[in-house]
Image (cartoon, rainbow, N blue to C red):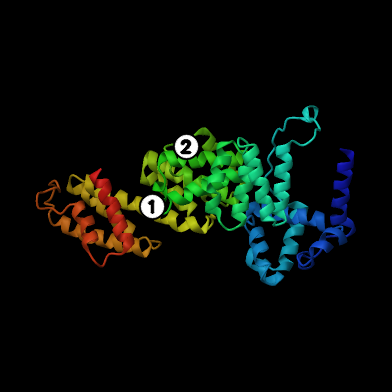
Amino acid sequence: MERRSTKLWRKQTLIRDSLGLRPLREFLALGQDEAIHGDVRYYPQAWAFVHFAAFGNNGAHQRSLSDLASRIRTEPVDAAFKSAFGMSLEEGDKALRTYLKRGKYSMAKIDIPDRVDSFVVMPATPIQVQAALGRLALATRNMELALHHANRLINEHPNDPKGFELRAMVKFEGNDPEAGREDVNRAVALDSQDAGMHVMAAQFELTERMQNFASLDEALSPEEARRVADRVIRALELRSIEPRAFEMLAISLMNVRELTTTDEGLLEVMERFMPKSGLPALVRSVSAYRQSGYHQARELHALACSPERELPASLRTAAKSMGEHWLFDKLKDAFQDAENTTEFDAAYSELETAMATPENSSNLTSTLRRMNDQVVKWRKHLPEGAPHRKANTPTLEDYWQSILDDPQSSQEERDNAQRALKRLIR
């Protein structure tokens, strides 16, 4: 323990006092050999920079590091850094120094059992040897040899997941992920300890089920959603570091019947360590909508979709569309349930408020206008104080059917109308 403390102290001293931080312009331009072997400052500064990107400014730069790693391959260092972090290299130098001196970030304390007494050194098993040789072949891009080790593992040890894990990875590296799907599922069924296998199994099922869906909270059946969620949770238990794991977890939790204690705990973890993410609020908005209705969910949904919160690009549009579907249903139910002029006027007031919202999409604006036109016709059949349902009064079914029959309707408008009709029939 003393040696480790001394090494850590020496690294901190090299950074803070003796040599100081390299300017980011130089630090990011270093080649691999020079970085590892030629500059004693590189390793500790690399740790400092990654820590700054992961935790600095309350996690605001968590996606910036991967963005930088992608951009720096094709763009100049200064342009890549500016695009990824939203600041110049010189501003980055200042931000990094400030963070190291007085940065604020969250910490988690986890009790880890002391297993020193139970640790035993022993020869590697035949399974471990074959798996290690296969992974080494995979890392050196010798796919034929890696596949040989994978098939040997499967033939000799069919009840061990390592062979299926290895063969799946060979197929993924060969740009044929669908071919590896069966091996992924076999590995998961054999209780694979590889978090990536559970993430990929969830990804396969999620991709298949979400080809066509009317709303984000209706993308999966409750049973499918629970299965995907449990797979992602298993990956997280195995220390998955896949950023998409939390996205998949959020999608699945928006489709389960109800959130479990474990689900709630994971949402709290996300809120603590991903404070800028809109995913937890989005999941909670769906839960509130199912339990209490539109008005209770609206505030959480608005928070999740606000510019201050981060949502994957693939989800932001779908999340906004989901909120619009909720509004459709709310207005539809309000008019459907109105039994007298007073209630009808209240429902119409809600429609007017919705029409005046500037953030509405073009499709929502068009649909609300058509609904307004239909409501104007309804009101003509409403004598003062009389029930609005008369034999000659157009119904909501007439309204949604008119959209389906209109050749000028967009595909999204038709989808919304079809969805509304199905709900009315139910």
**Along the line of sight, the residue nearer the viewer: 206 or 312:** 206
Q: Quadrant of residue 130?
A: top right
Question: In the rendered image, is residue 56 in sight?
Answer: no
Q: Is residue 420 left or right of residue 2?
A: left
Question: In the rendered image, is residue 401 in sight?
Answer: yes
Q: Residue furthest left?
A: 391
- What is the crowding at mark 2: few (fewer than 14 residues within 10 Å), some, or many (at least 20)? some
Q: In this view, does 402 lie to the left or right of 114?
A: left
Residue shown at 52% from the left, 52% from the top: 178
- What is the crowding at mark 1: few (fewer than 14 residues within 10 Å), some, or many (at least 20)? few
**Along the line of sight, the residue nearer the viewer: 426 or 231:** 231
Q: Is residue 20 left or right of residue 317?
A: right
Residue 159, above or below 403: above
Q: Quadrant of residue 394?
A: bottom left
Asked if labels 2 and 1 touch by Cβ distance under 8 angstroms, the answer is no
- Element class at badge 2: loop
- Percent of width and height locating residue 263: 52, 38
Query: Where is mark 2, residue-wise?
Result: 259
| Image quadrant where one finds the C terminus | top left
- Element class at badge 1: loop
Residue shown at 67% from the left, 54% from the top: 144
- Percent of width and height locating residue 192: 61, 39
Sequence-wise first label, 1 or 2: 1
Residue shown at 62% from the left, 50% from the top: 169
Identify which amino acid the numbered label 2 is placed on.
Leu
Query: Where is mark 1, residue-wise?
Result: 213
- Percent of width and height locating residue 299: 44, 49
**Along the line of sight, the residue nearer the viewer: 221 or 81:** 221
Q: Which residue lies furthest to the top in this view?
A: 117
